[in-house]
Image: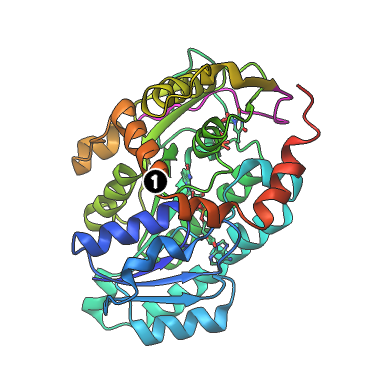
Protein backbone atom coordinates (compact mmCIF):
# COMPACT_ATOMS: atom_id res chain seq x y z
CA UNK A 1 0.00 0.00 0.00
CA UNK A 2 0.99 3.60 -0.57
CA UNK A 3 0.11 5.36 2.67
CA UNK A 4 -0.41 9.12 2.83
CA UNK A 5 0.02 9.98 6.51
CA UNK A 6 -0.75 13.47 7.79
CA UNK A 7 0.61 14.73 11.12
CA UNK A 8 3.22 11.96 11.12
CA UNK A 9 5.82 13.99 13.00
CA UNK A 10 3.59 14.06 16.10
CA UNK A 11 3.20 11.44 18.79
CA UNK A 12 0.80 8.84 17.37
CA UNK A 13 1.54 9.53 13.69
CA UNK A 14 5.29 9.00 14.19
CA UNK A 15 4.72 5.77 16.10
CA UNK A 16 2.38 4.64 13.31
CA UNK A 17 4.97 5.40 10.62
CA UNK A 18 7.75 3.59 12.50
CA UNK A 19 5.50 0.54 12.91
CA UNK A 20 4.36 0.73 9.28
CA UNK A 21 7.93 0.69 8.00
CA UNK A 22 9.12 -1.97 10.47
CA UNK A 23 6.21 -4.28 9.77
CA UNK A 24 5.92 -3.73 6.04
CA UNK A 25 2.47 -2.12 6.06
CA UNK A 26 3.44 0.03 3.09
CA UNK A 27 5.38 2.95 1.64
CA UNK A 28 4.79 6.20 3.49
CA UNK A 29 4.50 9.85 2.53
CA UNK A 30 4.29 12.03 5.65
CA UNK A 31 2.80 15.53 5.38
CA UNK A 32 3.33 17.56 8.54
CA UNK A 33 3.27 21.27 9.25
CA UNK A 34 5.86 20.86 12.02
CA UNK A 35 4.03 22.70 14.78
CA UNK A 36 5.43 22.88 18.33
CA UNK A 37 4.08 19.32 18.96
CA UNK A 38 6.20 17.69 16.27
CA UNK A 39 9.74 16.41 16.37
CA UNK A 40 11.48 15.18 13.22
CA UNK A 41 14.21 13.66 15.35
CA UNK A 42 11.69 10.91 16.13
CA UNK A 43 11.89 9.78 12.50
CA UNK A 44 15.61 10.24 11.96
CA UNK A 45 16.14 6.48 11.43
CA UNK A 46 13.96 6.66 8.31
CA UNK A 47 16.08 9.33 6.59
CA UNK A 48 17.77 6.73 4.39
CA UNK A 49 14.64 4.64 3.84
CA UNK A 50 13.75 4.89 0.12
CA UNK A 51 10.11 4.07 0.89
CA UNK A 52 9.63 6.98 3.26
CA UNK A 53 9.18 10.62 2.20
CA UNK A 54 8.68 13.65 4.39
CA UNK A 55 6.93 16.79 3.13
CA UNK A 56 6.61 19.89 5.29
CA UNK A 57 3.22 21.51 4.75
CA UNK A 58 -0.31 22.19 5.92
CA UNK A 59 -3.27 19.85 5.33
CA UNK A 60 -5.21 23.08 4.68
CA UNK A 61 -3.06 23.92 1.65
CA UNK A 62 -5.32 22.52 -1.07
CA UNK A 63 -2.89 23.16 -3.90
CA UNK A 64 -0.09 21.31 -2.12
CA UNK A 65 -2.33 18.41 -1.04
CA UNK A 66 -3.77 18.03 -4.58
CA UNK A 67 -0.24 17.90 -5.91
CA UNK A 68 0.81 15.24 -3.35
CA UNK A 69 -2.15 13.02 -4.28
CA UNK A 70 -1.16 13.25 -7.96
CA UNK A 71 2.51 12.65 -7.29
CA UNK A 72 2.29 9.76 -4.80
CA UNK A 73 -0.97 8.06 -5.87
CA UNK A 74 -1.86 6.86 -2.35
CA UNK A 75 -4.08 3.86 -1.61
CA UNK A 76 -4.99 5.36 1.75
CA UNK A 77 -4.93 8.58 3.76
CA UNK A 78 -4.47 8.31 7.53
CA UNK A 79 -5.31 11.70 8.99
CA UNK A 80 -3.53 12.31 12.30
CA UNK A 81 -2.85 16.01 11.68
CA UNK A 82 -4.48 18.07 14.40
CA UNK A 83 -4.10 20.47 17.25
CA UNK A 84 -4.50 17.95 20.03
CA UNK A 85 -4.15 19.50 23.50
CA UNK A 86 -7.32 20.43 25.42
CA UNK A 87 -5.65 23.09 27.59
CA UNK A 88 -4.30 24.89 24.51
CA UNK A 89 -7.78 24.75 22.94
CA UNK A 90 -9.13 26.55 26.02
CA UNK A 91 -6.50 29.30 25.84
CA UNK A 92 -6.43 29.62 22.04
CA UNK A 93 -9.22 27.84 20.13
CA UNK A 94 -8.53 29.50 16.76
CA UNK A 95 -5.81 27.06 15.60
CA UNK A 96 -8.10 24.13 16.43
CA UNK A 97 -10.79 25.37 14.08
CA UNK A 98 -8.26 26.10 11.36
CA UNK A 99 -6.49 22.73 11.36
CA UNK A 100 -9.02 20.29 12.77
CA UNK A 101 -12.07 21.61 10.91
CA UNK A 102 -10.93 23.63 7.87
CA UNK A 103 -7.82 21.49 7.38
CA UNK A 104 -9.79 18.23 7.45
CA UNK A 105 -12.34 19.73 5.07
CA UNK A 106 -9.62 20.63 2.56
CA UNK A 107 -8.02 17.21 2.88
CA UNK A 108 -11.40 15.61 2.20
CA UNK A 109 -11.86 17.82 -0.87
CA UNK A 110 -8.46 16.85 -2.24
CA UNK A 111 -9.14 13.16 -1.52
CA UNK A 112 -12.53 13.32 -3.22
CA UNK A 113 -11.08 14.97 -6.30
CA UNK A 114 -8.27 12.40 -6.52
CA UNK A 115 -10.45 9.35 -5.77
CA UNK A 116 -13.14 10.30 -8.31
CA UNK A 117 -10.61 10.17 -11.14
CA UNK A 118 -8.99 6.86 -10.21
CA UNK A 119 -9.35 3.71 -12.31
CA UNK A 120 -11.94 1.24 -10.93
CA UNK A 121 -9.55 -1.12 -9.09
CA UNK A 122 -7.68 1.73 -7.40
CA UNK A 123 -10.99 3.43 -6.56
CA UNK A 124 -12.22 0.29 -4.82
CA UNK A 125 -9.02 -0.03 -2.82
CA UNK A 126 -8.82 3.60 -1.66
CA UNK A 127 -9.57 4.48 2.00
CA UNK A 128 -9.70 7.73 3.98
CA UNK A 129 -9.05 6.92 7.64
CA UNK A 130 -9.82 9.77 10.00
CA UNK A 131 -8.26 9.45 13.46
CA UNK A 132 -10.64 10.91 16.02
CA UNK A 133 -11.05 10.80 19.77
CA UNK A 134 -13.41 9.53 22.48
CA UNK A 135 -13.71 13.15 23.69
CA UNK A 136 -16.40 13.87 21.07
CA UNK A 137 -18.82 11.81 23.22
CA UNK A 138 -18.54 14.17 26.21
CA UNK A 139 -18.32 13.22 29.87
CA UNK A 140 -19.63 10.19 31.82
CA UNK A 141 -20.88 9.84 35.38
CA UNK A 142 -19.29 7.19 37.63
CA UNK A 143 -21.77 4.43 36.76
CA UNK A 144 -22.70 5.38 33.18
CA UNK A 145 -22.05 2.73 30.54
CA UNK A 146 -18.92 3.22 28.40
CA UNK A 147 -19.08 5.10 25.07
CA UNK A 148 -20.34 3.00 22.17
CA UNK A 149 -20.18 3.88 18.47
CA UNK A 150 -23.87 4.91 18.74
CA UNK A 151 -23.36 7.24 21.73
CA UNK A 152 -24.60 10.73 20.76
CA UNK A 153 -21.97 13.42 20.31
CA UNK A 154 -21.64 15.89 23.22
CA UNK A 155 -18.24 17.61 22.87
CA UNK A 156 -17.36 19.89 25.79
CA UNK A 157 -13.99 21.51 25.00
CA UNK A 158 -13.07 23.54 21.90
CA UNK A 159 -10.71 20.65 21.03
CA UNK A 160 -13.50 18.06 21.26
CA UNK A 161 -15.88 20.32 19.33
CA UNK A 162 -13.36 20.79 16.51
CA UNK A 163 -12.78 17.03 16.27
CA UNK A 164 -16.55 16.43 16.30
CA UNK A 165 -16.99 18.93 13.46
CA UNK A 166 -14.31 17.14 11.44
CA UNK A 167 -15.99 13.76 12.13
CA UNK A 168 -19.28 15.13 10.80
CA UNK A 169 -17.58 16.27 7.59
CA UNK A 170 -16.01 12.83 7.14
CA UNK A 171 -19.42 11.23 7.67
CA UNK A 172 -21.01 13.61 5.15
CA UNK A 173 -18.36 12.85 2.50
CA UNK A 174 -19.19 9.16 2.81
CA UNK A 175 -22.95 9.66 2.67
CA UNK A 176 -22.98 12.33 -0.02
CA UNK A 177 -20.07 11.42 -2.29
CA UNK A 178 -19.49 7.77 -1.23
CA UNK A 179 -15.87 8.57 -0.43
CA UNK A 180 -14.69 5.34 1.29
CA UNK A 181 -14.10 6.73 4.77
CA UNK A 182 -13.38 5.12 8.14
CA UNK A 183 -13.42 6.93 11.49
CA UNK A 184 -11.89 5.79 14.77
CA UNK A 185 -12.47 7.11 18.29
CA UNK A 186 -9.62 6.28 20.60
CA UNK A 187 -9.13 6.87 24.30
CA UNK A 188 -6.05 8.53 25.86
CA UNK A 189 -2.77 7.25 24.41
CA UNK A 190 0.55 7.03 26.21
CA UNK A 191 3.96 5.70 25.26
CA UNK A 192 7.30 6.76 23.79
CA UNK A 193 7.62 10.06 21.88
CA UNK A 194 4.67 11.91 23.43
CA UNK A 195 5.07 15.67 23.80
CA UNK A 196 5.41 16.51 27.51
CA UNK A 197 2.39 18.79 27.70
CA UNK A 198 0.18 15.69 28.16
CA UNK A 199 -0.30 14.20 31.62
CA UNK A 200 1.99 11.15 31.59
CA UNK A 201 5.20 12.58 30.06
CA UNK A 202 4.73 15.89 31.91
CA UNK A 203 4.50 14.13 35.28
CA UNK A 204 7.32 11.74 34.45
CA UNK A 205 9.77 14.49 33.49
CA UNK A 206 8.78 16.79 36.35
CA UNK A 207 9.17 13.90 38.82
CA UNK A 208 12.66 13.10 37.51
CA UNK A 209 13.67 16.71 38.13
CA UNK A 210 12.03 16.92 41.57
CA UNK A 211 9.52 19.52 40.36
CA UNK A 212 5.86 19.79 41.53
CA UNK A 213 3.44 17.33 39.91
CA UNK A 214 0.33 19.39 39.03
CA UNK A 215 -2.99 17.56 39.38
CA UNK A 216 -6.06 19.45 38.24
CA UNK A 217 -8.98 19.63 40.69
CA UNK A 218 -9.38 16.65 43.01
CA UNK A 219 -7.49 14.18 40.78
CA UNK A 220 -10.56 11.92 40.55
CA UNK A 221 -11.18 12.49 36.82
CA UNK A 222 -11.02 9.16 35.02
CA UNK A 223 -9.35 8.38 31.69
CA UNK A 224 -8.97 5.09 29.81
CA UNK A 225 -5.29 4.63 28.86
CA UNK A 226 -4.06 2.76 25.78
CA UNK A 227 -0.43 2.10 24.83
CA UNK A 228 0.29 3.86 21.55
CA UNK A 229 1.49 0.83 19.54
CA UNK A 230 -1.81 -0.90 20.35
CA UNK A 231 -3.65 2.10 18.90
CA UNK A 232 -1.51 1.96 15.75
CA UNK A 233 -2.22 -1.74 15.27
CA UNK A 234 -5.92 -1.08 15.67
CA UNK A 235 -5.71 1.61 12.98
CA UNK A 236 -3.98 -0.80 10.63
CA UNK A 237 -6.70 -3.40 11.21
CA UNK A 238 -9.40 -0.80 10.54
CA UNK A 239 -7.62 0.22 7.35
CA UNK A 240 -7.34 -3.35 6.12
CA UNK A 241 -10.66 -4.80 7.20
CA UNK A 242 -12.92 -1.98 8.38
CA UNK A 243 -16.33 -1.58 6.83
CA UNK A 244 -16.50 1.49 4.59
CA UNK A 245 -18.36 4.37 6.23
CA UNK A 246 -18.15 2.75 9.67
CA UNK A 247 -16.79 4.10 12.95
CA UNK A 248 -14.78 2.08 15.47
CA UNK A 249 -14.10 2.78 19.14
CA UNK A 250 -10.62 1.87 20.36
CA UNK A 251 -9.74 1.68 24.06
CA UNK A 252 -7.44 0.10 26.60
CA UNK A 253 -10.05 -1.29 29.02
CA UNK A 254 -7.94 0.48 31.58
CA UNK A 255 -9.81 3.18 33.48
CA UNK A 256 -7.73 5.07 36.04
CA UNK A 257 -8.12 8.24 38.06
CA UNK A 258 -5.47 10.86 37.34
CA UNK A 259 -4.27 10.60 40.91
CA UNK A 260 -3.76 6.84 40.56
CA UNK A 261 -1.81 7.34 37.31
CA UNK A 262 0.48 9.90 38.92
CA UNK A 263 1.03 7.75 42.01
CA UNK A 264 1.94 4.74 39.84
CA UNK A 265 4.49 6.83 37.93
CA UNK A 266 5.98 8.00 41.24
CA UNK A 267 6.26 4.44 42.58
CA UNK A 268 7.91 3.18 39.38
CA UNK A 269 10.40 6.06 39.32
CA UNK A 270 11.28 5.61 42.98
CA UNK A 271 12.22 2.00 42.12
CA UNK A 272 13.98 2.68 38.79
CA UNK A 273 15.77 5.92 39.64
CA UNK A 274 15.81 6.21 43.44
CA UNK A 275 16.77 9.57 44.88
CA UNK A 276 17.90 9.45 48.50
CA UNK A 277 15.40 11.09 50.85
CA UNK A 278 12.81 11.70 48.13
CA UNK A 279 9.51 9.91 47.71
CA UNK A 280 8.19 11.31 44.38
CA UNK A 281 4.57 11.24 45.52
CA UNK A 282 5.46 14.04 47.98
CA UNK A 283 5.77 16.28 44.88
CA UNK A 284 2.04 15.90 44.06
CA UNK A 285 0.39 19.33 44.03
CA UNK A 286 -3.33 19.86 43.54
CA UNK A 287 -3.90 22.92 41.34
CA UNK A 288 -6.86 24.86 39.98
CA UNK A 289 -9.06 22.68 37.77
CA UNK A 290 -9.30 22.85 33.98
CA UNK A 291 -12.46 24.79 33.00
CA UNK A 292 -15.19 22.40 31.83
CA UNK A 293 -13.00 19.42 32.79
CA UNK A 294 -14.68 16.18 31.61
CA UNK A 295 -15.11 13.87 34.59
CA UNK A 296 -14.84 10.44 33.04
CA UNK A 297 -14.16 8.79 29.68
CA UNK A 298 -14.66 5.06 29.11
CA UNK A 299 -14.67 3.20 25.81
CA UNK A 300 -16.64 0.13 24.87
CA UNK A 301 -14.38 -1.40 22.21
CA UNK A 302 -16.31 -4.64 21.76
CA UNK A 303 -17.12 -3.82 18.11
CA UNK A 304 -13.50 -3.69 16.90
CA UNK A 305 -12.69 -6.74 18.97
CA UNK A 306 -15.66 -8.72 17.61
CA UNK A 307 -15.48 -7.60 13.97
CA UNK A 308 -11.75 -7.12 13.40
CA UNK A 309 -10.23 -9.33 16.10
CA UNK A 310 -8.24 -6.48 17.69
CA UNK A 311 -7.24 -6.53 21.37
CA UNK A 312 -4.68 -4.40 23.22
CA UNK A 313 -1.47 -6.37 23.86
CA UNK A 314 0.04 -4.14 26.51
CA UNK A 315 -1.24 -3.79 30.08
CA UNK A 316 -0.81 -0.53 31.99
CA UNK A 317 2.10 -1.72 34.17
CA UNK A 318 4.16 -3.06 31.27
CA UNK A 319 3.27 -0.11 29.01
CA UNK A 320 4.15 2.45 31.66
CA UNK A 321 7.44 0.71 32.47
CA UNK A 322 8.37 0.75 28.75
CA UNK A 323 7.36 4.40 28.48
CA UNK A 324 9.45 5.48 31.46
CA UNK A 325 12.44 3.51 30.18
CA UNK A 326 12.14 5.17 26.75
CA UNK A 327 12.23 8.67 28.27
CA UNK A 328 15.20 7.71 30.46
CA UNK A 329 17.04 6.39 27.38
CA UNK A 330 16.35 9.46 25.19
CA UNK A 331 17.55 12.59 27.03
CA UNK A 332 18.45 14.31 23.71
CA UNK A 333 14.91 13.91 22.37
CA UNK A 334 13.54 15.30 25.63
CA UNK A 335 15.95 18.24 25.62
CA UNK A 336 14.99 19.12 22.06
CA UNK A 337 11.21 19.17 22.60
CA UNK A 338 11.52 21.06 25.89
CA UNK A 339 13.55 23.91 24.44
CA UNK A 340 12.06 27.08 22.99
CA UNK A 341 8.32 27.60 23.16
CA UNK A 342 7.73 24.72 25.60
CA UNK A 343 8.92 26.94 28.46
CA UNK A 344 6.49 29.68 27.40
CA UNK A 345 3.65 27.14 27.47
CA UNK A 346 4.50 25.99 31.00
CA UNK A 347 4.35 29.58 32.21
CA UNK A 348 1.07 30.26 30.41
CA UNK A 349 -0.70 27.13 31.66
CA UNK A 350 0.66 26.66 35.17
CA UNK A 351 1.80 30.02 36.57
CA UNK A 352 -1.68 31.33 37.34
CA UNK A 353 -3.14 28.06 38.71
CA UNK A 354 -2.98 28.69 42.43
CA UNK A 355 -2.29 25.56 44.51
P1 LIG B 1 0.25 15.57 18.33
O1 LIG B 1 -0.20 16.92 18.78
O2 LIG B 1 1.35 14.89 19.05
O3 LIG B 1 0.68 15.64 16.79
C1 LIG B 1 -0.04 16.32 15.82
C2 LIG B 1 0.84 16.47 14.59
O4 LIG B 1 0.05 17.13 13.58
C3 LIG B 1 2.09 17.32 14.81
O5 LIG B 1 3.22 16.71 14.25
C4 LIG B 1 1.76 18.62 14.08
O6 LIG B 1 2.92 19.27 13.56
C5 LIG B 1 0.85 18.14 12.97
N1 LIG B 1 -0.03 19.18 12.46
C6 LIG B 1 -0.76 20.08 13.19
N2 LIG B 1 -1.44 20.90 12.37
C7 LIG B 1 -1.15 20.50 11.10
C8 LIG B 1 -1.57 20.95 9.82
N3 LIG B 1 -2.40 21.99 9.69
N4 LIG B 1 -1.10 20.32 8.74
C9 LIG B 1 -0.22 19.28 8.87
N5 LIG B 1 0.21 18.82 10.04
C10 LIG B 1 -0.25 19.43 11.15
O7 LIG B 1 -1.06 14.68 18.32
P2 LIG B 1 -1.23 13.13 18.62
O8 LIG B 1 -1.37 12.92 20.08
O9 LIG B 1 -0.21 12.37 17.86
O10 LIG B 1 -2.67 12.86 17.99
C11 LIG B 1 -2.80 12.51 16.62
C12 LIG B 1 -4.28 12.40 16.29
O11 LIG B 1 -4.89 11.42 17.13
C13 LIG B 1 -5.04 13.70 16.51
O12 LIG B 1 -5.95 13.86 15.45
C14 LIG B 1 -5.79 13.48 17.82
O13 LIG B 1 -7.00 14.20 17.83
C15 LIG B 1 -6.02 11.98 17.79
N6 LIG B 1 -6.10 11.34 19.10
C16 LIG B 1 -5.10 11.54 20.03
C17 LIG B 1 -5.19 10.88 21.26
C18 LIG B 1 -4.09 11.05 22.29
O14 LIG B 1 -4.25 10.56 23.42
N7 LIG B 1 -2.97 11.68 21.99
C19 LIG B 1 -6.28 10.06 21.54
C20 LIG B 1 -7.26 9.87 20.57
C21 LIG B 1 -7.17 10.52 19.35
P1 LIG C 1 -4.28 15.17 29.00
O1 LIG C 1 -3.05 14.33 28.95
O2 LIG C 1 -4.16 16.62 28.69
O3 LIG C 1 -5.37 14.46 28.06
P2 LIG C 1 -6.96 14.77 27.89
O4 LIG C 1 -7.28 16.09 28.46
O5 LIG C 1 -7.10 14.74 26.42
O6 LIG C 1 -7.68 13.64 28.58
O7 LIG C 1 -4.90 15.05 30.46
C1 LIG C 1 -5.26 13.79 30.99
C2 LIG C 1 -5.94 14.04 32.32
O8 LIG C 1 -4.97 14.59 33.23
C3 LIG C 1 -7.06 15.08 32.24
O9 LIG C 1 -8.10 14.68 33.11
C4 LIG C 1 -6.42 16.36 32.73
C5 LIG C 1 -5.38 15.87 33.72
N1 LIG C 1 -4.16 16.71 33.84
C6 LIG C 1 -3.72 17.11 35.12
O10 LIG C 1 -4.34 16.78 36.14
N2 LIG C 1 -2.59 17.86 35.19
C7 LIG C 1 -1.88 18.27 34.10
O11 LIG C 1 -0.88 19.01 34.25
C8 LIG C 1 -2.35 17.84 32.81
C9 LIG C 1 -1.61 18.25 31.56
C10 LIG C 1 -3.48 17.06 32.74
Inspect this view and state whether residue 31 appears.
Answer: yes
| Picture quadrant of residue 111 | bottom left
Dot 1 surroundings within 10 Å: few (below 14), some, or many (20 or more)? many
Q: Using residue 266 as the reference point, say whether residue 236 is left or right of it.
A: left
Q: Using residue 81 as the reference point, say whether residue 338 is left or right of it.
A: right
Residue 82 x %, y %: 55, 57
Q: Residue at x 73, y 31 (%)?
A: 291
- Placement of 3 over or under 273, stated as above or below: below
Closer to the camera, 112 or 134? 134
- Placement of 33 over or under 288, stated as above or below: below
Name the residue carrying label 1: 192
Residue 207 x %, y %: 54, 30
Which SS class for mark 1?
A: loop
The part of the chain drawn in magenta is 287-300
Which is the main secondary structure of the residues drawn in magenta?
loop
Q: Residue at x 27, y 39 (%)?
A: 304
Residue 47 x %, y %: 34, 74
| Picture quadrant of residue 230 | top left
Closer to the camera, 110 or 187? 187
Q: Residue at x 78, y 36 (%)?
A: 351
Q: Which quadrant is the C terminus positioned in?
A: top right
Amino acid sequence: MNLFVTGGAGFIGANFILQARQQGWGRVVNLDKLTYASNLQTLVDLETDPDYTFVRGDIGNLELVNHLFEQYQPDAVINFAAESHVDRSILNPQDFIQTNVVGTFRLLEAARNYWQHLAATQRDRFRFLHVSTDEVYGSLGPSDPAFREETPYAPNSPYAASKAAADHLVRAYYHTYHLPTLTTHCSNNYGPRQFPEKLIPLILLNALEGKPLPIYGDGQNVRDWLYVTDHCEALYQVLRQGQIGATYNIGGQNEQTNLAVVETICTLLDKLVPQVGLSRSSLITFVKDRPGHDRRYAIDCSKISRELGWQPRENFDSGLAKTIQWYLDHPDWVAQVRSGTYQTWLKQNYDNRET
